[in-house]
Amino acid sequence: MTYREAIGFLESLQMFGAKPGLERARRLAAALGNPQDRLRFIHVAGTNGKGSTCAMLESIYRQAGLKTGLFTSPHLVAFAERMQVNRRLIPEAEVVRLVATLQGPVAQLGAEDHPTFFEVATLMALVFFAEQNCDLVIWETGLGGRLDATNIVTPLASLITNIHYDHQKWLGHTLEEIAFEKAGIIKPGVPVITAADHSGALAVIARQAELNSAPLTHVGLAEARRGLAAEAFLPLPGEHQRLNAATALAAVEVLQPYVQVPITAMRAGLESVYWPGRMQTVTQPGGRQIVLDGAHNLAGVAALEKTLAAQFPGQRPAVILGILRDKDWREMCGLIAPAAARLLLVNVGSERTVAAEELAAACRDLPSPAPISCHHSLGEALAEISREPLTVITGSLYLIGEAMELLGLSPAPPNGERSLNEWGGVPAA
């Protein structure tokens, strides 16, 4: 099997879409010797900030001398971003070997109960991390938590970063319903750390923690504004990232009896954390700046606006915007348009994209809209802003991945792998 053939096999799994439930993942794990039983995890759920919090935790524990596994999704450019050991991407040869290893167990489940792409990727990661003898795995949920394939593990701690509106079709239409799905990662006796600030959502998390006799630690802005979370240099800008840092530090403190981390490693981990596509600023020749931020829901756009005002006071950027249809895209337009000097609307390279013309219609309905233009591609839009002093690209992590390729920030695989992020989550228009 070649690497291209391995990726082709993974692409073939996309036809099975997203199927909530743990039974398929458990059966695959059993066929592979239950690799999760040989590992220790910190399981991270939440609406926003999961990836950044995972990156902070990984960096802290790696600075403490542990061999770390990191499992996140979606990837921005390459599939290998999803599973890393000590922040080194899984080699292509290992992807090929693991796909070959999984093909037999996948076939045995049969067509009627066929595992999904995400379930197979989850099991690939478990096998890889176990083979690599990782000391600790930072383990991000894919969608929700309760019925997410990652939930077959029993972690040292469960983190729920926050609860906002996103993926309502699958997770529920109230914050309490969404919180219930996220709180499904809580296990009996396993400590829970959360930065959820909505009273109803927090009550749901607290109730699930109580039912599981799981000690609960709540982190708020007060914790983000004092101590190491406030003092450390943080490469990821924004007050929301300070809150993510406080949440990560709270987890580290809770787990000190099991995994000791000196304060020097905590500081070094935060100050060296790297997580691309989140308020990532690229300075081009002549001093022009392009900000990449994968703000893909209402809460993300609100955090982006606040951080832009703090980082670039008095400046109104040109905004290149592309959004997926399963998001609250009209409301997102309403938040981002007033902050823009001009809006360049593009299609995201996904079957779930909102057409640029639809975005334009929504933006033109807003009071005092910025100048609006539609573009067939991100490359075309980038060519239009060649003289803009400040440009923001946002609306979808998929769009950020495309921007990273076009700007030369991340080399693109020869045949492209961003399409692997498609998982059949296309709601009715």
Image (cartoon, rainbow, N blue to C red):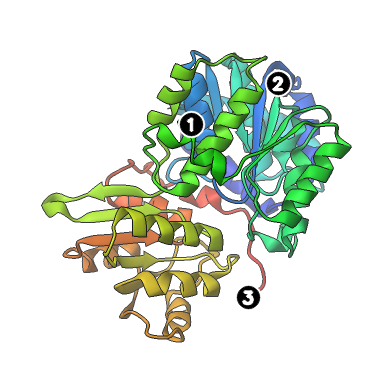
Identify residue type, mark 2. Pro
Q: Are the residues flagged by discs 1 and 3 in contact, CB closer than 8 Å?
A: no
Q: Position of residue 138 (x, y in %)?
A: 59, 29
Of the 4 image quadrants, the one containing the C terminus is bottom right
Which residue is depicted at the point 69% across and 45% down?
116
Report the residue at 66% width, 33% height from top. 43
Q: Single out the residue that lies furthest toward the left.
A: 286
Q: Secondary structure under badge 3? A: loop
Q: Is residue 377 above or below residue 143?
A: below
Question: Which circle marks residue 429 in the picture?
Answer: 3
> Can I make out residue 223 in this image?
yes
Q: CA distance from mark 2 to mark 3?
A: 41 Å
Viewer-proximal residue among 167 and 272: 272
Q: Answer with left or right where residue 64 lies relative to residue 253.
A: left
Q: Compare marks 2 and 3 and give the one earlier in the sequence.
A: 2
Q: Nearer the viewer, mark 1 or mark 3?
A: 1
Q: Earlier in the sequence, mark 1 or mark 3?
A: 1
| Residue bearing mark 2 | 35
Q: Which residue is mark 1?
A: 227
